[in-house]
Image (spheres, rainbow, N blue to C red):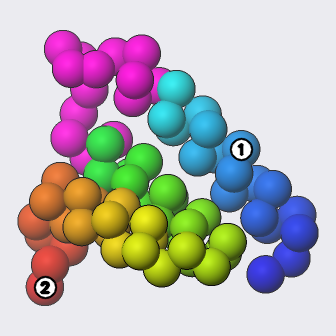
Amino acid sequence: MLDTEVALLRTHLAETRETVLADYPEKTPIAAVGNWQLLAAIEALITGDRRVAMYHYAWFRACCPEAKS
């Protein structure tokens, strides 16, 4: 991955996290939580932390069951 792509991912991850936490739990769509967790899983893979990546990916799958297929 290019450094610019990693920076963009991290920016989007931070924005998504802030949005989800600001609205949680009253107005947060479950898909937004899933998106946050998927972005966090990708970021963990980039940093080489497979355990954290699997943690976030498990939450993504719990939030977005249609992604299990």
Answer whether residue 64 is visible to the viewer in this image: no
Where residue 24 sits, quadrant-wise, is top left
Quarter of the picture holding the C terminus? bottom left
**Residue 54 seen:** yes
Task: Say which residue appears at 62% left-offset and 79% top-offset.
Answer: 48
In magenta segment, residue 61: no
Above or below, 22 against 58 in this view is: above
Q: Which residue is mark 1?
A: 11
Q: Do the numbered discs 2 and 1 sit on residues whose CB atoms are within 8 Å?
A: no
Q: Nearer the viewer, residue 50 or 18?
A: 50
Please name the residue shown 69% across and 51% down the image: 10
Point 81% across, 56% down: residue: 7
Q: Quadrant of the N terminus?
A: bottom right
The residue under label 2 is: 69
Quick one: label 2 or label 1, which is nearer the N terminus?
A: 1
Task: Tell me how many marks there are.
Answer: 2
**Residue 26 drawn at (x, y percent):** 18, 14
> Circle 2 — which element?
loop
Residue type for callout 1? Thr
**Other residues around mark 1 within 10 Å, as few (<14) / some (14–19) / many (≥20):** few
How far from the left and from the top, in percent, is residue 45? 57, 76
Residue range in magenta is 19-32
Q: Tag 1's secondary structure?
A: helix
In the picture, residue 8 is in which quadrant? bottom right
In this rendering, would 52 be left or right of 62?
right
The type of residue carrying mark 2 is Ser
Alpha carbons under labels 2 and 1: distance apart: 29 Å
* Camera-side mark, 2 or 1: 1
Mark linked to residue 21: none
Residue 59: x, y in percent? 24, 58
On screen, residue 57 versus residue 16, left or right, reads: left
